[in-house]
Image (tube, grey):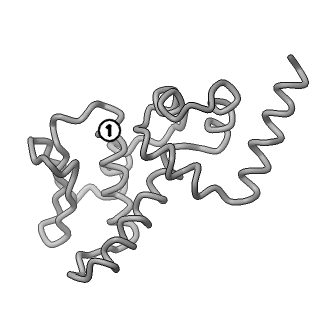
Amino acid sequence: MSHYCPWADLGRRHSDVLLDVRQIGPARAVWLPDSRVIFVDSSLSWAQGRCALAHEIAHIDLKHKHSGFPWFDARQEAEADQLAARRLIGIAALAEAYAWSHDSAQLAEALNVDGATVLTRWNHLHPSERHYIEARIALIEHAA
């Protein structure tokens, strides 16, 4: 499991940002840069809330702002998804979990994230990270 805690990260690096947890569905979370507020939907599970907050912190760190251009905003969303997934799922934790199961739902549960975050992390692995996972699995299989 990754040691990244978005709540601690927010307090440590972005103490000027207010976190407000309330019902905001259908959105999971929203970052309002002009107001310096992150809203997170109160109906989310702990893992979903963890992922949503990490995503919004990624927007802050990447200095994203709503552009009004759908293609550009979609690119910013993808960038925030990828940064949040890297922070939430360390490569060693992913390798250990993947050695145990290849099912995305089981991986998500083991890694304390949602399924979309597991898929984002997996789909954007660096070649060296893929090599690490393969080597780790080979080592585990050899030991068994």
Image location of residue 123, percent across then percent down: 57, 54
Which residue is tagged 1? 48
Q: Position of residue 143 (x, y in %)?
A: 89, 20
Please report the residue visible at 51 percent of the width from the left and 37 percent of the height from the top.
3
**Dot 1 alpha-carbon crowd within 10 angstroms: few under 14, some 14 to 19, many 20 or more:** many
User: In percent of the image, x 32 and y 43: which residue is there?
Assistant: 7
Tell me: 123 left or right of 47: right
Asked which secondary structure carries label 1, the reply is helix
Q: Residue at x 50, y 43 (%)?
A: 118
In what quadrant of the picture does the C terminus appear? Answer: top right
Position of residue 101 relative to residue 122, above or below, is above
Closer to the camera in the image, 95 or 15? 95
Q: Dividing the picture into quarters, in which one does residue 103 lie? A: top right
The x, y position of residue 25, in whole percent, is: 12, 46
Name the amino acid type tagged 1. Answer: Gln
Where residue 95 sits: x, y (%)?
A: 68, 37
Which quadrant of the figure has residue 90? top right
Q: Nearer the viewer, residue 37 or 71?
A: 71
Quadrant assignment for the N terminus: top right
- Give the residue drawn at x 26%, y 55%: 15
